[in-house]
């Protein structure tokens, strides 16, 4: 004779099913987080590249707009005391 499941067994089974569902959701969330971290890494690399190129452009434009005056550059003494 097979006995009917008790209330405690049913509750245990229900809780295990909830736990399994929670693990599934957590696994998907961790996978999504890993994907977002990978995308963040790509975006940060692109930002570094952009910032470097942009800084080079600004320095080039600044050098063209503000040329150094040769009269202001100090002459170096070569061995004079």
Image (cartoon, rainbow, N blue to C red):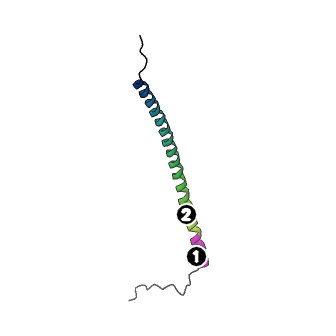
Pick the front one: 75 or 45: 45
**Quadrant in which the N terminus is drawn:** top left
Q: Residues within 10 Å of mark 2 (few under 14, many from 20)?
A: few
Pick the front one: 46 or 23: 23
Q: Is residue 54 left or right of residue 20?
A: right
Query: SS for tag 1?
Result: helix
Pick the front one: 78 or 28: 28
Among the two numbered marks 2 and 1 on one chain, the one whose residue lies closer to the N terminus:
2
Q: Is residue 9 left or right of residue 37?
A: left
Query: SS for tag 2?
Result: helix
In the rendered structure, find residue 51 and report the number of the disc placed on it. Answer: 2
Q: Position of residue 71 (x, y in %)?
A: 54, 87
Q: Which residue is mark 1?
A: 63
Q: Is 64 included in the stretch rendered in magenta? A: yes
Task: Please report contact status of discs 2 and 1: CB closer than 8 Å, yes or no.
Answer: no
Q: Give the residues in magenta.
A: 58-66
User: What is the C-alpha distance between the residues marked 2 and 1?
Assistant: 18 Å
Q: Position of residue 22 (x, y in %)?
A: 47, 36
Q: Is residue 66 above or below residue 10?
A: below
Q: Main secondary structure of the magenta part?
A: helix
Q: Position of residue 25 (x, y in %)?
A: 50, 38
In the rendered structure, find residue 13 and report the number of the disc placed on it. Answer: none
The structure residue drawn at horizontal position 51% and vertical position 39%, both measured from the top left corner, is 28
Pick the front one: 76 or 27: 27
């Amino acid at each position: 004779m097979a006995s009917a499941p008790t209330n405690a067994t049913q509750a245990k089974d229900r809780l295990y099913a909830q736990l399994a569902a929670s693990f599934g959701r957590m696994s998907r969330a961790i996978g999504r987080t890993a994907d977002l971290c990978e995308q963040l890494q790509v975006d940060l690399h692109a930002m570094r590249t952009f910032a470097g190129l942009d800084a080079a452009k600004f320095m080039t434009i600044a050098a063209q707009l503000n040329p150094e005056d040769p009269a202001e550059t100090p002459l170096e003494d070569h061995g004079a005391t």
